[in-house]
Image (cartoon, grey):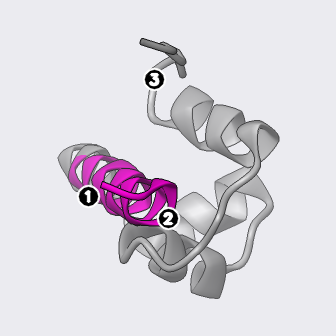
Amino acid sequence: MSWKKEHEAMLKEIGQKLCELRKEQGMSQLDLAVEADLSQTFISRLERGAANPTVQSLQRIAHILGRKITIDII
């Protein structure tokens, strides 16, 4: 698999997980966006795997959702 395909798959996986966690918390995309000081459009794009988030934005979102971000290079 090319790096581009791996990157696209990783973004989709991140987005799906964040969407799942957000829903478990009973939050709307707008609720999460306001708390994280991000736009609702960005949250929507992120959950669809269409945004390339920074580590900082992922950390803010994870903190709000009661989680931590870890990165493994294998």
Q: Main secondary structure of the magenta part?
A: helix
Where does the image place residue 21, in percent across and percent down from the top left? 28, 43
Q: How far apart are marks 2 and 1 (CA)?
A: 18 Å
Q: In this view, does 7 lie above or below 60?
A: below
Q: Distance between the residues labelled 3 and 2?
A: 30 Å
- Element type where label 1 sits in the image: helix
Structural crowding at the residue carrying mark 3, measured as other residues with C-alpha within 10 Å and reported as few (<14), some (14–19) or many (≥20): few
Quadrant of the rendered image containing residue 38: bottom right
| Mark 3 residue type | Gly
Q: Which of 48 and 60 is in front in this view?
A: 48
Structural crowding at the residue carrying mark 2, measured as other residues with C-alpha within 10 Å and reported as few (<14), some (14–19) or many (≥20): few
Q: Which of marks 2 and 1 is in front?
A: 2
- Element type where label 2 sits in the image: helix
Q: In this view, does 73 lie above or below 6?
A: above
Quarter of the N terminus within the rendering: bottom left
Q: Mark 3 points at which residue?
A: 66
User: Quick check: marks 3 and 1 in contact, CB under 8 Å?
Assistant: no
| Mark 1 residue type | Gln
User: Of the residues under marks 2 and 1, which one precedes in the sequence?
Assistant: 2
User: Of the residues under marks 3 and 2, which one precedes in the sequence?
Assistant: 2
Q: Which of 29 and 72 is in front in this view?
A: 72
Q: Mark 2 points at which residue?
A: 4
Q: Nearer the viewer, mark 3 or mark 2?
A: 2
Q: What stretch is highlighted in magenta?
A: 1-20
Q: In this view, does 55 lie above or below 40?
A: above
Q: Mark 1 points at which residue?
A: 16
